[in-house]
Amino acid sequence: MLSIWLVLVSCIDFVLYSSAEEGLVFPSFDGRDRVLNVNERNYKKALKKYDMMCLLYHEPLPSDKELQQQFHMREMVLELAAQVLEDKDIGFGLVDSYKDAKVAKKLGLEEEESIYVFKDERVIEFDGELSADTLVEFLLDLLEDPVELISNPMEQRAFERMDEDIRLIGYFKGEDSEQDTYVSSIFKEKGLCIVFICNCFMLQVAKQLTLKMNEIDFYEPFMDEPVTIPGKPNTEEEIVDFVNQHRRPTLRKLRAEDMFETWEDDMDGIHIVAFAEEEDPDGYEFLEILKEVARDNTKNPDLSIVWIDPDEFPLLTTYWEKTFKVDLFRPQIGVVNVTDADSVWLNMPNDEALPSAEELEDWIEDVLSGKVNTEDDDDDDDDDDDDEDFDDDSSDEDHYGSDDDD
Amino acid sequence: MLSIWLVLVSCIDFVLYSSAEEGLVFPSFDGRDRVLNVNERNYKKALKKYDMMCLLYHEPLPSDKELQQQFHMREMVLELAAQVLEDKDIGFGLVDSYKDAKVAKKLGLEEEESIYVFKDERVIEFDGELSADTLVEFLLDLLEDPVELISNPMEQRAFERMDEDIRLIGYFKGEDSEQDTYVSSIFKEKGLCIVFICNCFMLQVAKQLTLKMNEIDFYEPFMDEPVTIPGKPNTEEEIVDFVNQHRRPTLRKLRAEDMFETWEDDMDGIHIVAFAEEEDPDGYEFLEILKEVARDNTKNPDLSIVWIDPDEFPLLTTYWEKTFKVDLFRPQIGVVNVTDADSVWLNMPNDEALPSAEELEDWIEDVLSGKVNTEDDDDDDDDDDDDEDFDDDSSDEDHYGSDDDD
């Protein structure tokens, strides 16, 4: 009996919910099959039937048994999501890249194992952690109106706090005006960014945000200062183009909902990766230094730091510690080669000796110039799999720790 | 083939990870059995062998096949956690409440289906979501030193931001002093709270926090003003007693790591539950109003509001919407009877008409006096299971919405 269980958990993570009193009972799969096998005969009807259609584009069912089980697990993620979202008018389907190649071509599906969401004539790709949790959260977000009206100082503060996302904010005529409807309709595509609108009652907020009538400001993640989209009033195309051009920020957070998309968007085969727990005083301090560096270097197109909060990826924490040979109870910054996961890390001898923003900028300059790179330490290469006792002194970089204990 | 998959997902949620480039590969279970069946012969040796021992206290293996599978799923959560944490010197075991009743008694295990963690002569109970994610995060947190040194204004800000937790902060002599060691040793038990220490270099921080030498301040979640633990310098017992007495806060957040513990700690069979997405401007605004109410009423022992951020429980969102008949895209506050999940909700007609703090206090007073209760609307009772189109106007409460559009 156990052997089947052992095989089952290959490549998956199990989540089990226990239930307590009423009001806090996790849903369990009811066994009803809701996910459609999409093909040429039924795809048009399916797309018409639901407000939103969510398609997993997948390789043909493999003959290998273990891979088959992985495939069924993925199907089950969709089944559970379909069950949980049953009342939300969302359809779920599978598109086989071999059998249904024609449908895939018609629908524009390209990346196998990605999920494509069809909504209001738009297609949004989901390239995050394929768990029921993350997928359901993503889909629920898509159901929400991406446009928020800022109508008091408290809501302005909420806007300022959401600094992990790309945000657009525009200042337009009152809530019911034609202009407002026009702007709302532009921004119906979520996944692009989050959009806020100040109406004319909120002249005070607009002034604080230095917004002029009909102007749209673009906020890169973690930036205090926005960039104004030129040529107001803007067309939908102009806005989308501008956002796409400025899509890759100087500092970005790894998030479950688009983690693979972020990781695949490397800079010439490397990532500058910073680990920092926001809930930890040292991590918080290091993150603030990082943000300062990002703000100082926001105009540098070659710089994009990936910030990972290990707290948000508990199952990956020890994998990263082993792969990168770093201690993730402390803040870390390093360069990772995404081809072989080889890496080199800035030496920070203890928590009380975080680098200053200037020291960090010097190190980043060395990374970008190639002076610090993952190839110079190749003596301890290729031992990812069998190391038991890693230490964090393997880096042969200079020590940039600050010594002032002011 | 499919039928076995259907059964498998009863009562569980599946999480599946796809892998991309190197550096971002989720671990998959390797099939090696690491979880020990703990019994009278081996428990002492097991407890001695590891820094930390994590025991699932469970009912005897049931004869029902579906329940058996649930049991194996739970075992698999432990197996995956054990694999991921292999290098962290944590042991994992199962204690059968029938076969190993003697061991359970000796170890003080009481609540079946709970996980007990043994560390440094202490026992910490885990009563949260039994997923590998949540369990691993909880255990990794336990490995970290719960004591943080605040040595600069940035770290003080980090301390102030962590307002969801119970926090203690003390002001003591320098880092290496005897006093500091004494205080550190007091606080080795995590799960109690998070502890901060200002050392004497940080007189400025201490002054801002109005701390005197050797004094310990207790911060309830979401409170700006601390309560000083009387009778400084305090003994360990005094501190633990004080924290236990003040453990139930006026406003508490539902968190995966202790969600069942929180839910079971009801107030005479009911919970006042507030739903608010912190990442949403209206949710944020409502939460700020809630915090204001909590601060104004922190001395009321009969009041403890459970705040749920639906974003953090995507799989429960539609369950709550159905069970409570509310729209969770908007902030909500209501009374929930934990015996039958019957509930009544404050009528807020739209996002722009959130109640003021005063209006919310009036409503809470009505709840605490019994004027607002879950039994007065029993005409639409007992239809939890078959409703398709819930609306959010079922409450017959007064409308407390504010009308000022300032």
Image (cartoon, coloured by chain):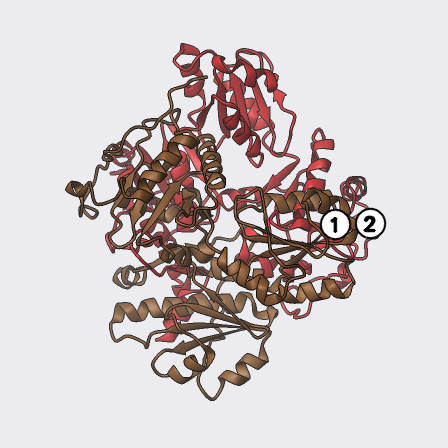
Chain colours: A red, B brown
Tell me where residue A257 appears, x and y as whole percent.
48, 43
Q: How crowded is mark 2: few (under 14 residues within 10 Å), some or many (20 or more)?
A: few
In the image, farthest residue toward the bottom = B41
Tell me where residue B106 appears, x and y as whole percent.
45, 82
Amino acid marked by disc 1? Ser
Q: Which residue is drawn at 27% across and 36% down?
A: A46
In the rendered structure, the answer to whether residue B24 lies left or right of residue B103 reads right
Residue linked to disc 1: B151
> Would you place residue B384 above or below residue B47 in this image?
above
Residue linked to disc 2: A405
In the image, farthest residue toward the left = B379
In the rendered structure, the answer to whether residue B50 lies left or right of residue B6 reads right
Say whether mark 2 and mark 1 are on the same chain: no
> Would you place residue B49 above or below residue A178 in this image?
below
In the rendered structure, the answer to whether residue B354 lies left or right of residue A220 reads left
Tell me where residue B246 appears, x and y as whole percent.
50, 55
Q: How crowded is mark 1: few (under 14 residues within 10 Å), some or many (20 or more)?
A: many
> Would you place residue B406 above or below residue B196 in this image?
above
Amino acid marked by disc 2? Asp
Q: In this rendered view, identify the residue nearer to me: B406 or B118.
A: B406
Q: Is label 2 in a helix, a strand or a loop?
A: loop
Q: In this rendered view, identify the residue nearer to me: B234 or B182.
A: B234
